[in-house]
Amino acid sequence: MSKCVGILTSGGDCAGLNAVLRAVTIRAIQGYGWEVYGIRHGTHGLLCRPLEYRKLDLNSFDGSVLRLGGTILGTINKGDPTAYPMEDNTFKDRSDEFAEGCQMLGLEAMIGIGGDGSLAILHRLMEKARIPFVAIPKTIDNDIGVTERSIGFTTAVDIATEALDRLQPTAASHDRVMVLEVMGRDAGHIALAAGIAGGADIIIIPEIPYKLQNIAHKIETILKKGRNSALVVVSEAVKTETGDVLQILDLNGRPRYGGIGHYISDEIMRLTGAETRFTVLGHVQRGGQPDASDRILASAFGVRAVDLIAEGKFDRMVAWHNRTVIDVPILEAIHLNSTVDPNDALVQTARGLGICLGDAPY
Ligand code: F6P
């Protein structure tokens, strides 16, 4: 029986989103003969009148789209329709308009691709609109608890690793300590993985409290042993030693992390006298081509999400577990946040390699 399925990308973009759109479209059309509508700019496309959407068919995906970063539908990480910011600084519940948009398009099911925040909003909206919903996890932060991996993570780790590959020779040429600040929100997954892959000497993550003296000691030990340079990776949500959160406010007063790389760099210079520079990698980690792992994960998630709709299994999120796609209740997925466990295997790996995590002098 023909079905009309909507799909949207919400929250921050990341590499691999287009690969999901492709997989969902191919499976829905070839496997079930359904129609697929891509909603523009996340939830926003269904609040617009006329509606903003794009019918997706097999011709929408020439050979290039699988390889593209970003999302061909556009996305949004503000303007929650349940508390929509209005010009007079008040908030309005626009979920009825959203539901009306779904009806106007004749949607019978929705697939939402997002992180925990946007999936929570989507879950509420779809419940109110009474449209069956299936979720696909994406976030470079890899902080959605019930899935071992989310789309975008491995590409972000590759990019941060490549940054270390590029910083190492310039550090060695100039006898410098290079500090790389990476994203990850409150989780240190990107910093830990990229730090190991990129040969960092010191990795500082929000989950493991550090002392500047330990970092300085590690650098002095490296220099004493005859190496003239060092690499430090720090995750954006790390606080100062005294516990201050470093944030930047945008024009609307919304805070985002920023500044810890600069702080750590200055403190290393002050304590050790080593010449130090810092680099903030920022949104570079979200752009560019998805790596092979993210394309494979996106394809597996996209196919399974469509199959879940065909099986009548709703309010589920697909997840990666032991080399296979499972599905879990979406409410569980939204509430289980995953930060780095201080006993995690990769933490042990880092310690085994002699990488300083800031909590002890090495
Ligand atoms: O959640 C993904 C993420 O890239 C975080 O790592 C980062 O803190 C945040 O989004 C940046 O958000 P924005 O794109 O709004 O600056």
Image (cartoon, rainbow, N blue to C red):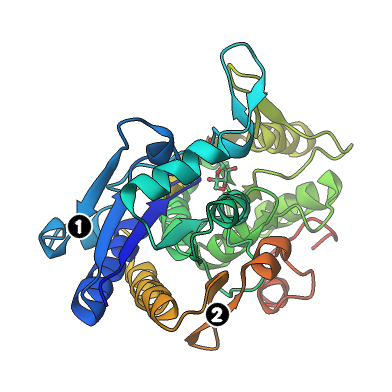
Q: Mark 2 = which residue? A: 327
Say which quadrant the N terminus sits in: bottom left
Nearer the camera: disc 2 or disc 1:
2
SS at badge 1: helix
Q: In what quadrant does ligand 1 lie?
A: top right
- Say whether marks 2 and 1 touch (CB < 8 Å): no
User: Tag on residue 181?
Assistant: none
Q: Please, is residue 74 above or below residue 208 in the view?
A: above
* Mark 1 crowd level (few <14, some 14–19, many ≥20, 10 Å Cα): some
Residue shown at the point (73%, 72%) measured from the top left: 351
In primary-sequence order, the first of circles 2 and 1 is 1
Residue shown at the point (57%, 58%) measured from the top left: 190
Q: Quick check: 127 left or right of 98?
A: right
Residue shown at the point (66%, 52%) measured from the top left: 223
Residue type at mark 2 is Asp
Q: Mark 1 = which residue? A: 65
Say which quadrant the C terminus sits in: bottom right
Q: Where is residue 191 in the image (x, y as percent from the top left)?
A: 60, 57
Q: Nearer the viewer, residue 142 or 343?
A: 142
Q: Please, is residue 128 above or below residue 197 in the view?
A: above
Q: Which of 25 and 213 is in front in this view?
A: 25
Q: Position of residue 61 (x, y in %)?
A: 16, 60
Residue type at mark 1 is Val
